């Protein structure tokens, strides 16, 4: 049956011999896609009188939405917290390699570092779409340095910072730029953290609570000021 182009000239792709998650179970069925959107095969057949322009045999593979990695510090020999001459090529390598692990977008994550590292690294990262070349970059995740000394984990203690007077300006001076920043992890029990949370939230940046000794009331106050996320829940925090 020839494809019906009255709806769209874009090709219809039929994925065969694949497994799809439905109702919490993997089901064997075909998947029909046009312009990146899943089609209802019944409407395609009966309303459009359409059929596949391209058929791809998935060989029993699972088709699923791509993973989004919001905290990845590097990989494949690349450390995002190191300001190297070939930093951009390192980002490209990680972006390409993680595709085979099902990750289609990610947030390059910097651990606690000196201001000089942030000033060198952050301008080299930009938001970009994913594709066959590699996973997309959603923005940077800055994990520290405004975290608890008691729950620092592997973060270098000598680089940890507290919020000084003019807390948000102190944060800006530390990072240098927030242009590509998507997430900031901080400890909400720190003095002046509420001001910082409000200012970050105003700028559309997700504030995540982590590496913290905050009690329940301190965490709830942070949420009231705009915090919406938690970094590695139940790890490096109070019971």
Image (spheres, grey):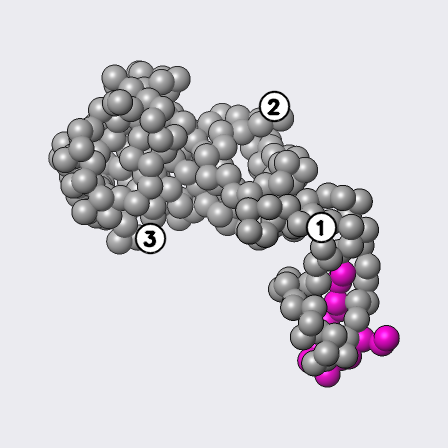
* Residue drawn at x 80%, y 75% as measured from the top left: 3
Task: Tell me the mark number nearer the camera, choosing from 1 and 2.
Answer: 1
Residue where numbered disc 3 is placed: 204
Which callout, 1 or 2, points at the residue further toward the start of the chain?
Answer: 1
CA–CA distance between discs 1 and 3?
A: 41 Å
Q: Is residue 3 above or below residue 186?
A: below
Q: Is residue 167 left or right of residue 76?
A: left
Which callout, 2 or 3, points at the residue further toward the start of the chain?
Answer: 2
Asked if residue 113 can be seen in this view, the reply is yes
Q: How many marks?
A: 3
Q: Which residues are magenta?
A: 1-14
Quick one: label 3, few (<14), some, or many (20+) residues within 10 Å? Answer: few
Q: Is residue 21 left or right of residue 217?
A: right
- Residue 95: image tag: none
Which quadrant holds the C terminus?
top left
* Residue drawn at x 25%, y 17% as measured from the top left: 150
Q: Main secondary structure of the magenta part?
A: loop
- Residue 28: image tag: 1
Residue where numbered disc 2 is placed: 77
Along the line of sight, which residue is nearer the eye, 146 or 230? 230
Q: Dot 1: what SS? A: strand
């Amino acid at each position: 049956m020839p494809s019906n182009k009255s709806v769209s000239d874009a090709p219809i792709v039929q994925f065969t011999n694949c497994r799809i998650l439905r109702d919490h179970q993997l089901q064997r069925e075909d998947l029909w896609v046009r312009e990146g959107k899943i089609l209802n095969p019944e409407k395609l057949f009966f309303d459009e009188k359409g059929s596949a322009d391209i058929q791809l045999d998935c060989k029993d593979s699972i088709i699923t939405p791509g993973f989004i990695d919001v905290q990845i510090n590097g990989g494949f020999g690349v450390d995002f917290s190191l300001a190297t001459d070939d930093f951009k090529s390192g980002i490209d390598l990680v972006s390409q390699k993680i595709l085979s692990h099902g990750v289609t977008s990610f947030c390059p994550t910097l651990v606690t570092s000196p201001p000089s590292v942030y000033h060198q690294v952050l301008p080299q990262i930009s938001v970009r779409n994913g594709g066959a070349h590699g996973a997309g970059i959603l923005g940077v995740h800055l994990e520290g340095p405004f975290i608890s000394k008691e729950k620092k984990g592997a973060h270098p203690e000598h680089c940890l910072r507290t919020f000084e007077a003019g807390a948000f300006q102190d944060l800006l001076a530390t990072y240098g730029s927030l242009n590509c920043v998507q997430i900031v992890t901080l400890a909400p029990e720190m003095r002046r953290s509420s001001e910082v949370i409000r200012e970050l939230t105003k700028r559309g940046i997700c504030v995540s609570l982590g590496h913290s000794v905050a009690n329940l009331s301190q965490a709830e106050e942070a949420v009231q000021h705009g915090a919406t996320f938690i970094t590695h829940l139940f790890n490096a925090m109070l019971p």
